[in-house]
């Protein structure tokens, strides 16, 4: 489902032309990741992913904790949690209970399947592996834990940006089962389909 390199280049070119017509000096004003070491990759659907995970935690949002963890990786999904106080602060927690609150959010992320944790020199939470968020979301959806409106919004955004992660996951499962992988839209995957709210 992802667009070809040629189509992406065409879109980028038109996007840049529009930008430069509105802000002729935009090139000198924006942040260029190519000139900095302080950047990493994130899914374009990250806002939808974060919104969905917060909908699962009943008034105890985990998105800021998750995003801080992601920003501490080197595009390898691995975090050494050697500065829990700092990590709690940048996750939005202050005061005497900041670190305890941060640990509870980390545990919740583990419970939901977004991360895994190993103990070590910094205590029970010393090393963190960030799982593929699409894998975690798919498993939660299969269990019926994600609201239909959240799931549908995520799917719509993924189609819009050309993300085929759920389709790839379905393909991996088909290969494990010895079946054939069928190309097509994300909504045609065995599990990643539009949900309907139950009738009341």
Image (cartoon, grey):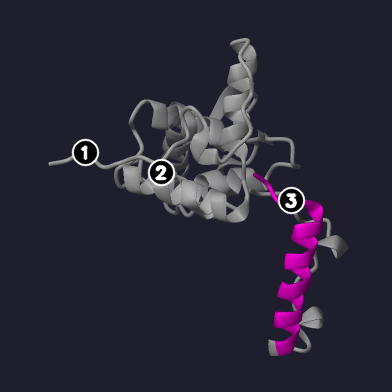
Residues in magenta? 1-21
Report the residue at 42% width, 33% height from top. 108
Q: Which numbered mark, 1 or 3, is in the foreground of this view?
A: 1
Helix, strand or loop under label 3? loop
Quarter placement of the N terminus? top right
- The local crowd at label 1, few if under 14, some if 14 to 19, many if 20 or more residues have their Cα within 10 Å, is few
Which element type, helix, strand or loop, lies under badge 2?
Answer: helix
As drawn, the label of residue 40 is: 3
Say whether residue 30 is left or right of residue 161: right
Foreground disc of the pair 3, 2: 2
Q: Residue at x 76, y 42 (%)?
A: 74
Residue 11 horizontal/vertical position (percent): 73, 66
Q: Position of residue 60 (x, y in %)?
A: 35, 45
Residue 62: image quadrant is top left
Q: Report, in whole angstroms, how far the alpha carbon at label 2 lies from the one at label 1.
A: 14 Å
Residue 98 x/y as whole percent: 44, 47
Of 117 and 50, nearer the camera is 50
> Vertical placement of 186 versus 172: above or below?
below
* Lower sequence index among marks 1 and 3: 3
What is the C-alpha distance between the residues marked 3 and 2?
Answer: 26 Å
Q: Is residue 123 visible?
A: no
Q: Which residue is mark 2?
A: 151
Q: If you read the primary sequence from the N terminus, does the residue marked by circle 3 or circle 2 appear first?
A: 3
Q: Quadrant of residue 122?
A: top right
Asked if residue 116 is among those painted magenta in the image, a careful observer would answer no
Q: CA distance from mark 1 to mark 3?
A: 40 Å
Return the residue at label 1: 198
Of pointers 2 and 1, the one earlier in the residue sequence: 2
């Amino acid at each position: 489902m992802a667009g070809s390199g040629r189509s992406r280049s065409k879109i980028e070119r038109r996007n840049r032309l529009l930008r430069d017509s509105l802000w002729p000096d935009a090139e000198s004003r924006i942040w260029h990741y190519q000139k900095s070491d302080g950047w990493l990759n994130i899914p374009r659907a990250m806002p939808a992913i974060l919104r969905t995970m917060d909908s699962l935690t009943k008034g105890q949002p985990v998105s800021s904790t998750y995003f801080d963890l992601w920003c501490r990786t080197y595009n390898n999904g691995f975090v050494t949690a050697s500065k829990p106080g700092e990590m709690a602060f940048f996750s939005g927690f202050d005061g005497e209970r900041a670190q305890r609150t941060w640990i509870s959010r980390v545990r919740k992320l583990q419970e939901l399947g977004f991360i895994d944790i190993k103990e070590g020199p910094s205590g029970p939470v010393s090393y963190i592996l960030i799982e593929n968020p699409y894998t975690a979301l798919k498993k939660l959806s299969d269990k019926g834990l994600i609201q239909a409106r959240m799931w549908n919004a995520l799917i719509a955004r993924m189609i819009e940006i050309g993300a085929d992660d759920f389709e790839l996951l379905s393909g991996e499962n088909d290969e494990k089962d010895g079946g054939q992988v069928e190309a097509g839209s994300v909504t045609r995957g065995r599990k990643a389909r539009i949900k309907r709210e139950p009738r009341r």
